[in-house]
Amino acid sequence: MASSLSSLFSKTIDLNPKKDPMTVLWRNVLTVGIEDLLKKKELQIKFDMRKSYSVEEMWFNHEDFDLICEYSELEPKIVKKRVYETIERMENRYANKDNLPKMPWQWLYKSEEISRRPERHNRTMSDVS
């Protein structure tokens, strides 16, 4: 009786699961693809080019993405949900334009000390000519 309980227990709980190298490989492929997508989306959001559609977005909505998720033993819907949440956080971060640093532009155009006119004898090449 005790041997049957121990064999049942060992089959249900595996405290040290062995990592399948193929699963790790496909998870790395998925990670790189998602990183590329997020980098592209960040550039689109930062420079307000949201209408453009990148190759990474096409891959993300293609059936190959579902196949890679299956090989990496992850649920594609959950992965997409997490990526969309990250994109939404990026949009919220860049939506507020008030978080940009303030620049004191007044001294550039209101200063009387800086003259935009060239002075003939205060140039470096005036001694040569």
Image (tube, rainbow, N blue to C red):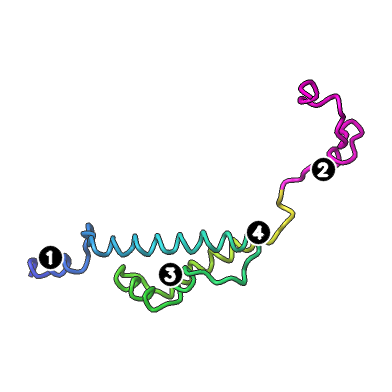
For badge 4, the amino acid type reads: Tyr
Query: Looking at the image, which residue is at 76% across and 26% down?
Result: 125
Q: Can you tell which of label 2 and label 3 is closer to the viewer?
A: 2
Compared across the picture, whether 62 is left or right of 105 comes to left
For badge 1, the amino acid type reads: Ser
For badge 3, the amino acid type reads: Val
Range of magenta residues = 101-129
Place of residue 121 in the rendered image (x, y in percent of width and height, measured from the top left): 86, 24
Q: Residues within 10 Å of mark 3 (few under 14, many from 20)?
A: some
Pointer 4 residue: 94
**Which badge, 2 or 3, is on the more N-terminal residue?**
3
Using the numbered discs, state the Cα–Cα distance from disc 3 to disc 1 in whole angstroms: 36 Å
Secondary-structure class at tag 1: helix
Q: Quadrant of the N terminus?
A: bottom left
Q: Residue furthest bottom?
A: 63
Pointer 1 residue: 6
Using the numbered discs, state the Cα–Cα distance from disc 4 to disc 3 in whole angstroms: 23 Å
Pointer 3 residue: 79
Question: Overall secondary structure of the magenta stretch?
Answer: loop
Using the numbered discs, state the Cα–Cα distance from disc 1 to disc 2 in whole angstroms: 76 Å
Query: Looking at the image, which residue is at 52% across and 69% down?
Result: 54
Place of residue 53 in the rendered image (x, y in percent of width and height, measured from the top left): 55, 72
Compared across the picture, whether 63 is left or right of 58 comes to left
